[in-house]
Amino acid sequence: MSGFRHDLVVVGGGPAGVAGALTAALAGLRVALVDSSARLGGQYFRHSRAAQDAPGGAPELDGFLRRGRALAERADLLLGHRVWHVSREDGGLAVHCVTPDEQPLTVRGARLLIATGAHDRVVPFPGWDLPGVLTAGGAQALLKGSGVLAGRRAVVAGTGPFLLPVAAGLAGAGADVLAVYEAARGLGLARHPVLALGKAGEAAGYALALARHRVPYLTRRAVVAAHGDGALEAVTVARIDAGWNVVDTRVVECDTLAVGHGFVPQIELGVELGCGTRADADGSPVLVVDAAQRTTVPGVWAAGEPTGVGGWRLAEVEGRVAGHAVAAEHRASTRASTRASTGAPAVSGGGHGAPRALLARRRGMRAFAEALQRAYPVAPGWQGWLRDDTLVCRCEEVPVSRVREAQRLGATDARSIKLLARPGMGWCQGRICGYAVSCLAGEEPRPPKRPIAQPITLGALARSTDEPTTPNTPDE
Amino acid sequence: MTEPFTITVDGRQVAVTPGQTIGAALHAAGIRSWRSTRFCGRPRGLFCGIGVCFDCLVSVNGRPAERACLREAAPGDEVTTS
Ligand SMILES: Cc1cc2nc3c(=O)[nH]c(=O)nc-3n(C[C@H](O)[C@H](O)[C@H](O)COP(=O)(O)OP(=O)(O)OC[C@H]3O[C@@H](n4cnc5c(N)ncnc54)[C@H](O)[C@@H]3O)c2cc1C
Ligand code: FES
């Protein structure tokens, strides 16, 4: 038996984290799950308070909510808790949180599952910081979590299959969605890669919804500028070539733009612990995991988007595999310590423990996810959309001209550009501009180094070094 | 708590459906920007919607630098913007 209060601490209450936590809890492990949101769900299963109080909506969400309730009965849920730091401690892991009332709290466990999801990736363009321009996921989160429509006359643009549910959601909730402008190849919706690759049900549903609302889906198009006096009034839409270079343009009036160019997996907690990383097919740094979802650091697992963007179904399968694997290792180590105390010989154990069918599903879904990433690349032509005064970094208000100036002064990589021109030194710590700065520097995005993953007040920081606290387990 | 309630934003009443974030309530009330940037005074409101970009910062009941897109509105919340 480990000397920790929890056998497993999970960070992230989305599809991956809930699946991992529930699988481990059902196997008898003592589990804690931490999420900064007020409700379980993560991005895909983000839902309103009303949906939580009165289930009976979409069957998928109902299924998730049922699993969430099952988890609440078997594990410690720490919702509204932001994890700002993780560290190794006495052979286990210490997960440092800030509670909803800004108090420090440390949750300790023998093992950690990182299921922190991803955030939208948006490449900069003139006017992208005007109010009314939202990330595609941001528009979706507003609708799913709060039931608020991002705007009335909306344009959806960028690249990737995720633009479909966003447009369908906005149109379904009553927005006038003028068009979806997809930068990728001109296949048209009928030959959309998602349909071609066999994820037919889901994409066909969105396609049908778009057709019903007469929303055109136009490929090889991009929003290359946003205009407005204090808020969005119009966008410049360009026909683009395969390299995202502008062929010709026209102006479309709208009050809302939902834009996304893929996702950035949130891997900083793993990076902090020294977990190995690799570049995924879309160029994003992701955590390296083995067949059991184990990272390269003993005791640390990862599932969902941090191991590669692949959507909620894959995230859930990976979470379950991780839960089985953690349980198998827990059993093996419990047996080993019993044996050690009785003097019996040690036997190696701790295989992945997951059902074969689950592993086969994961293999198929990963291949599909990789094909999708390759079908929706970000091409370098977006750099030609920039003007000297286009902000690269929204927090520190660093325009393109200052990045170029730093480069002229001899900054040859993203790190030295950051030191000279300060992009990525503001509140968001480069989460939003990091990808663009790497591209401008002509390098692959590097794993982020953020010793503080979430804001913490100096007071809470000072208190966190005092006597460590742990949550009370109700059944103790 | 299922009845709609209000919060004040710089003294102005804003309606909230329970469970909405402060950012969502502002957006729904037609307030799409509520902060100006430090250097150029550019308007900012919601961008990422999930707590990543820090565009949406407000003060809530005297506590500065709260992300409006994350923080669920509570009855009587006093929100101030900068
Ligand atoms: C804004 C947004 C909206 C999306 N909407 C959809 C959609 O409608 N349909 C769709 O098919 N796909 C959507 N996606 C894609 C989404 O990434 C996946 O489909 C799916 O949600 C991934 O599941 P996950 O479990 O890996 O991560 P997520 O669902 O992202 O869950 C991760 C969880 O970790 C928590 N977390 C992260 N860091 C910390 C920390 N430091 N401390 C505490 N908690 C933390 C987050 O609050 C979150 O709840 C969206 C993505 C984004 C970014
Ligand atoms: S809108 Fe990005 S942090 Fe709130």
Image (spheres, coloured by chain):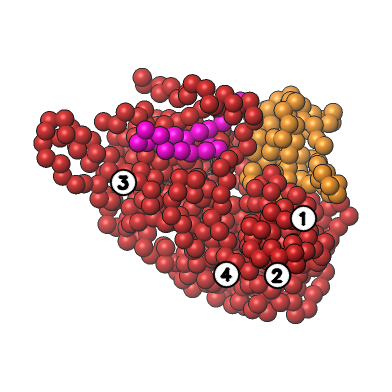
Per the image, label 1 sits on a secondary structure element best described as: strand
**What is the C-alpha distance between the residues marked 3 and 1?**
46 Å
Mark nearer the viewer, 2 or 4: 2
Displayed quadrant of residue A114? top left
Q: Pointer 2: what residue?
A: A382
Count of all numbered marks drawn on residues in the image: 4
Question: Which numbered disc, 3 or 1, marks the residue that appears first in the sequence?
Answer: 3
Q: CA distance from mark 4 to mark 3?
A: 33 Å
Q: Which one is in front in this view, the residue at disc 1 or the one at disc 4?
A: 1
Image mark 4: chain: A
User: Disc 1, disc 2: CB below 8 Å?
Assistant: no
Q: Can marks 4 and 3 be said to lie on one chain? A: yes
Determine which residue is flagged by label 4.
Answer: A376
**Chain of the residue displaying label 1:** A
- Secondary structure mostly seen in magenta is strand
Identify which residue is drawn at 29% across, 31% down: A2
**How busy is the neighbourhood of tag 2: few (under 14 within 10 Å), some, or many (20 plus)?**
some
Q: Which residues are magenta?
A: A83-101
Query: At label 3, which amino acid type do we have?
Result: His
> Which amino acid type is marked by label 1?
Val
Which residue is tagged 1? A398
Residue at image coords 48%, 70%: A371
Dot placed on the residue nearer the N-terminal end, 4 or 3:
3
Decide: marks 4, 3 in contact (CB < 8 A)?
no
